[in-house]
Image (cartoon, helix red, strand yellow):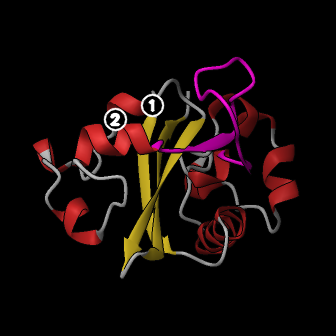
Amino acid sequence: MGATGWDYLVPFDGSVATTLEQLRAEVFAAGDYYWPGGDDRPKPATEDELWADEWVHESMTHSILDIFKVGTGDPASDDAFGSTFEVTAGECERIFGTTRVTADDLARMPRPDGDPTAALNPLLTHRGVGRHLIVHAAGVPDQILFFGYSGD
């Protein structure tokens, strides 16, 4: 099947960890993830059941559900798998020309082939590692863009 890119722009909910947890719950509840076997197998009722499935361990969910925590340090490190890492101020400056990215800055990003995060994709180190970008409004965090790719 190959890896799948994913991105979610969601309201900031007080902290990156809280926002990630809320987003994961919403994606799971909506069933908006890859489930091996498709409609031939009922989707699990809990995330524990999801991750108990051997096929999911092999193929992952191709969604934010493959990201479990907020990481610190280097997103290219060997222990980065399953974590999301903040886009640094230097990376923001290089890509957007500012360290406080706004929704207008996101709207101006080039979108080759309709990919909303194409300009950010070079920041991705490997599958199963996400990145997040805090989007500001009136100088304060307003939204978070989570993006990455995962899957087999």
Q: Nearer the viewer, residue 124 or 65?
A: 124
Q: Is residue 9 visible to the viewer in this orientation of the structure?
A: yes
Q: Is residue 86 magenta?
A: yes
Q: Position of residue 47 (x, y in %)?
A: 80, 59
Amino acid type at circle 2 is Asn
What residue sits right under mark 2 in the picture?
121
Outermost residue on the top side: it is 78
Q: Position of residue 28 (x, y in %)?
A: 66, 66
Amino acid type at circle 1 is Leu
Q: Secondary structure at mark 2?
A: helix
Which stretch did the figure color magenta?
Answer: 67-88
The residue positioned 34% from the left and 28% from the top of the image is 122
Using the numbered discs, state the Cα–Cα distance from disc 2 to disc 1 in whole angstroms. 5 Å
Q: Quadrant of the C terminus?
A: top right
Q: Is residue 76 magenta?
A: yes
Label pair 2/1, CB-CB below 8 angstroms: yes
What residue sits right under mark 1 in the picture?
124
Q: Secondary structure at mark 1?
A: loop
Q: Residues within 10 Å of mark 2 (few under 14, many from 20)?
A: some
Q: Is residue 148 left or right of residue 43?
A: left
Q: Nearer the viewer, residue 36 or 72?
A: 72
Outermost residue on the bottom side: it is 138
The residue positioned 29% from the left and 47% from the top of the image is 117
Q: Is residue 117 left or right of residue 111?
A: right
Q: Position of residue 13 (x, y in %)?
A: 62, 78
Q: Nearer the viewer, residue 102 or 31?
A: 102
The residue positioned 37% from the left and 38% from the top of the image is 91
| 88 over 64 or under it: above or below | above
